[in-house]
Image (cartoon, rainbow, N blue to C red):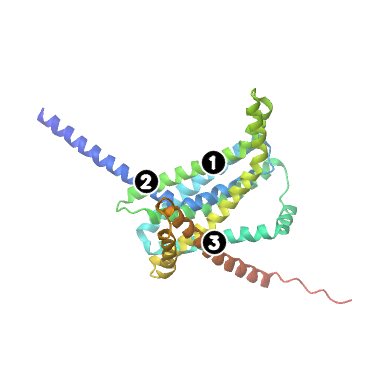
């Protein structure tokens, strides 16, 4: 009997250790997910464009195909690479964060440039790939999965930098939770967004109560504006999160003054206001300053890219006569 009680004590002790480990994994995954939030917003804002132009019955299957590709990117390709990096080359994490943050700033600034140069979108639309619906859908999905790979790489690197544990298994479990959770959150939100206009049409046509029909009509009218706002927030998030990643990586590499300066300004704004809004104002000031830094960094990258590209695509001179 005493042996059985001792065994039960051991089982309880092991269960407590397992529960503690699980709590640690979940806590680390939650912290990592918060740090990757800006890239997640970017990912969710980018994806809806890949279902534009397709019939309503193909929207959800396309989103599901992209979600499966995203899970493959994160769990099969990127997570093992991130774990190998943490074991064999942890020194490379901060340079990779610098590259990822710079890329986010570049993408955000390029979107701002595109919004200010609408003729570029017209030219892109004129050269849109044409063909039968099946091959066009497959081409769109492949393009979306390629884009997702870059964004997922940023998510995994940012998440890895936020996970602090001595156990490789805990690190792997936390990364897996982040990968699955973020993928379902992003593509679940995208699926809901792309179907909201269909939900509105259904309510407007078939709802028995007039308030519901009015709500459905309002939903149809509002969705283009909602999608525009979502895209705008995604672009802003790319810039401020990209800059935040850059500043934090530079601080970890020994150059503390840029991040410390921005934190100091945000702290002064916090100290100048009343307690109910202090933290919110500090966050807003910090995000606004990060946005400006991201726009400057991204603008420099876009300008450099265009200058280099123009050197290789100079128009041929036309011979006189």
Q: Earlier in the sequence, mark 1 or mark 3?
A: 3
Q: Distance of mark 3 from mark 2, alpha carbons?
A: 30 Å
Q: Specify the farthest residue to the top.
A: 208
User: Foreground mark, 1 or 2?
Assistant: 1
Residue under numbered circle 1: 189
Question: Which residue sits at x=14%, y=31%?
Answer: 5
Q: Nearer the viewer, residue 205 or 169?
A: 205
Q: Nearer the viewer, residue 211 or 196?
A: 211
The reply to whether discs 3 and 2 touch (Cβ–Cβ < 8 Å) is no
Q: Earlier in the sequence, mark 3 or mark 2?
A: 3
Residue under numbered circle 3: 105
Spot occupied by residue 191 in the image (x, y as percentages of width and height)? 57, 39
Residue under numbered circle 2: 173
Would you place residue 61 above or below residue 299 in this image? Answer: above
Q: Residues within 10 Å of mark 3 (few under 14, many from 20)?
A: many
- The local secondary structure at tag 2 comes to helix
Q: Earlier in the sequence, mark 1 or mark 2?
A: 2
- The local secondary structure at tag 3 comes to helix
Would you place residue 84 above or below residue 219 in this image? Answer: below
Q: Distance of mark 1 from mark 2, alpha carbons?
A: 24 Å
Spot occupied by residue 303 in the image (x, y as percentages of width and height)? 62, 68
Q: Is residue 128 left or right of residue 88?
A: right
Spot occupied by residue 88 in the image (x, y as percentages of width and height)? 36, 60
Spot occupied by residue 189 in the image (x, y as percentages of width and height)? 54, 41
Residue 118's label in the rendered image is none
Is residue 196 visible to us here?
yes
Q: Specify the farthest residue to the right.
A: 321
Would you place residue 146 above or below residue 62 in this image? Answer: below
User: Foreground mark, 3 or 2?
Assistant: 3
Q: Residues within 10 Å of mark 2 (few under 14, many from 20)?
A: some
Q: Residues within 10 Å of mark 1 (few under 14, many from 20)?
A: some
């Amino acid at each position: 009997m005493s042996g059985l009680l001792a065994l039960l004590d051991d089982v309880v002790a092991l269960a407590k250790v397992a529960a503690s480990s699980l709590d640690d994994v979940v806590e680390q995954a939650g912290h990592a997910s918060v740090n990757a939030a800006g890239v997640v917003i970017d990912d969710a804002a980018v994806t809806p464009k890949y279902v534009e132009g397709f019939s309503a019955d193909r929207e959800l299957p396309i989103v599901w195909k992209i979600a499966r590709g995203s899970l493959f990117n994160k769990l099969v390709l990127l997570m093992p690479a991130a774990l190998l990096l943490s074991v064999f080359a942890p020194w490379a994490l901060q340079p990779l964060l610098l590259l990822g943050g710079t890329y986010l700033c570049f993408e955000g600034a390029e979107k701002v440039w595109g919004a200010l140069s609408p003729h570029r979108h017209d030219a892109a639309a004129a050269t849109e790939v044409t063909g039968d619906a099946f091959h066009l859908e497959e081409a769109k999905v492949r393009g979306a999965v390629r884009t997702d790979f870059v964004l997922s790489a940023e998510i995994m690197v940012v998440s890895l930098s936020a996970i602090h544990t001595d156990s490789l298994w805990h690190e792997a479990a936390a990364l897996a939770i982040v990968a699955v959770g973020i993928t379902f959150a992003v593509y679940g939100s995208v699926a809901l967004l792309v179907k909201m206009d269909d939900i509105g049409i259904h309510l407007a046509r078939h709802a028995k109560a007039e308030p519901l029909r009015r709500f459905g009509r309002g939903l149809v009218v509002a969705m283009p504006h909602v999608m525009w706002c979502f895209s705008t927030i995604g672009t802003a998030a790319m810039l401020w999160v990209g800059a935040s990643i850059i500043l934090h990586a530079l601080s970890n590499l020994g150059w503390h003054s840029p991040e410390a300066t921005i934190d100091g300004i945000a702290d002064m704004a916090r100290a100048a206001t009343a307690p109910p809004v202090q933290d919110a104002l500090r966050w807003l000031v910090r995000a606004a300053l990060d946005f400006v830094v991201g726009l400057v960094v991204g603008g420099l990258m876009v300008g450099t890219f265009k200058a280099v590209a123009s050197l290789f695509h100079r128009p041929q001179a036309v011979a006189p006569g």
